[in-house]
Image (cartoon, coloured by chain):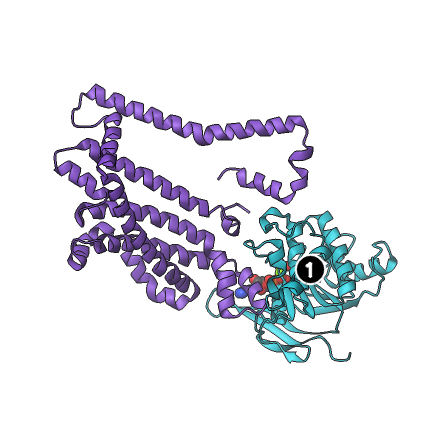
Chain colours: A purple, B cyan
Amino acid sequence: MSATPVHEAVAHAAPDAAAPTAPAAPARLAGERRSQQFLSRYVLPVLVVVFALAAWDAAVRLSGSTLFPRPIEVAAGIGELARQGLLLKYIAASRFRVTWGFTLAVLVGVPLGLFMGWFSWAANALNPIVQALRPISPIAWIPIAILWFGISDAAPVFLIFLASVFPITVSSMAAVSNIQPVYVRAARNFGLSRVQLFRRVIVPATLPQIITGLRIALGIAWLVVVAAEMIAVNSGLGYLIIDARNAGKRYDLVVAGMVMIGAIGLILDILVRRLERFDAVRWGYSRR
Amino acid sequence: MNRPAVDIRGVSMVFAGKRRGETIPTLDNVSAQVPEGQFVCIVGPSGCGKSTLLNIVAGFLAPSAGSVTVEGERVTGPDPRRIFVFQENGVFPWLTVRDNVGFGLLRRAADERARAVAHYIEMVGLTGFEGAYPRELSGGMRQRVEIARALAASPDIIYMDEPFGALDFITRLKMRADLTRIWQTEKKTILFVTHDIEEAVQLGDRVLVMSKRPGRIVDDVTIDLPRPRDLDAPGYLRARDRIFHAMGMSAHLGETAPV
Ligand SMILES: Nc1ncnc2c1ncn2[C@@H]1O[C@H](COP(=O)(O)OP(=O)(O)OP(=O)(O)O)[C@@H](O)[C@H]1O
Ligand SMILES: [Mg+2]
């Protein structure tokens, strides 16, 4: 993590000590630091992307491959999909499945994990099953998903649920056992009922780690939807990739699909990271 | 008042050790009576069972033998009428200073609650930091938040377990002066655990001295000196030396006397 939260914290704690009375020199220094931050945070990654695209382009041209697409062809492929209306349709289809599978996993995994973390008998009873199911790749479940749900949206939703429910459960459980005992004792001292203890201490104390678990699980869900769509349905970004390959070796569309998957994954991660900036959870990520 | 606020009778504590059958005798037949409104310090060497004793008195631990009676009721668990200030800071990091201080007041009306919160934030000198989060505060400020949170719940008794242990010397002196001032206005019964003899003599009406583990009370020293205390007054030095002696040390050499 960078030093930014500390700066912001200091500015917040002593608002009157900051900018207004600061002499010119420190202000200029601060300005320089800000522009440096801008450089390393935004300009640098863009440069790296541009460089990677150039290297890709050069490699394709040097090799003389006719099947593997150049970046410009991929961009054209994305444009073609957009014009046909397939792009938005497939993204919507994939997003629909991830939303449902992931939401179900949150609804099951968070309560289950909190429950197992709080009651050691529940952890003793359920942990072996959870730990044995967890290492089974969701891909291995595809035949069973098709057996149970056929070629329908339910199959990928089920697979996404399976893929994300275990990391969510395990991280929620760990979050409870990581609660500092002093918080629970303080809460008991103030005479909280069980429900109040849960709402006012257990939930806020575990939230930072639960959010981290959700972020990891969402990444996995997005991985799995693509795999599931290659087999169990006939729409979505995964289907796009396998269909472009099978129907005419359109590798420009294959890579276009991959690029869209990557871009959406990036956006999802940025959105979940936003959650980690809220004041009620930020304490859980700083060093103090 | 002839009924003591806190009545500790024959409390012993034996923990189970790591190995099977091993036992760790930690408290040995501790008895003490604390009258209402008294500021009592408990000193003893590290590991002698001070925290254990205070946790038993507060109801977080059940003693192996003996009993604790507070205001005429046998203690069986923690109670919001007696608030514990923890050795490791127990301020909730997900709440602002304001919400931390108001934590024990949820059953009160909103305006009454706001008034109490503002009052105690001012008392501990944190006005202006109501909206700050604990991570934005120094260690001393966090300890002030916890003290304000305890006071705001208007308990009859406050238990403090080395509340200033993690603070630097200057901050500790300031906190002691503030706590003395607060105690003089609030008139609470306070049980204050520390391993710092000077701290005990500066703060307490009375100092209970514990032996090393298994902890027993080996001396009970009344500190009848006006506050704020003059650290060079003969009475202060006498009390301090007596406690050093009771703990088997010489105040001037800081060495352990042969037993
Ligand atoms: N839950 C426990 N299980 C086993 N042993 C314990 C437990 N709690 C405390 N002890 C032991 O009891 C003894 C006294 O511990 P306690 O924390 O009461 O000491 P203390 O006087 O508060 O020390 P310090 O000044 O370092 O805080 C120690 O030897 C400790 O190892
Ligand atoms: Mg202790």
Q: Is residue B117 left or right of A244 when viewed as pictured?
A: right
The CB of the residue at mark 1 lies under 8 Å from ligand 1: no
Q: Amino acid at mark 1?
A: Thr
Residue B50 appears in the rendering: no
Residue A66 appears in the rendering: yes
**Frontmost residue, A10 versus A156:** A156
Location of mark 1 (residue) = B194
Q: How many numbered marks have been drawn onto this rendered protein structure?
A: 1
Q: Quadrant of residue B60?
A: bottom right
Residue under the point 42% across and 51% down:
A211
Residue under the point 24% across and 35% down:
A83
**Frontmost residue, A37 versus B30:** A37
Q: Is residue B161 left or right of A259 when viewed as pictured?
A: right
Residue B140 versus residue A69 in the image, above or below: below
Indicate the chain on which mark 1 is placed. Answer: B
Quarter of the image where ligand 1 sits: bottom right
- Which element type, helix, strand or loop, lies under badge 1? strand
Residue B170: give x, y in percent of width and height. 73, 47
Residue A57: give x, y in percent of width and height. 26, 23
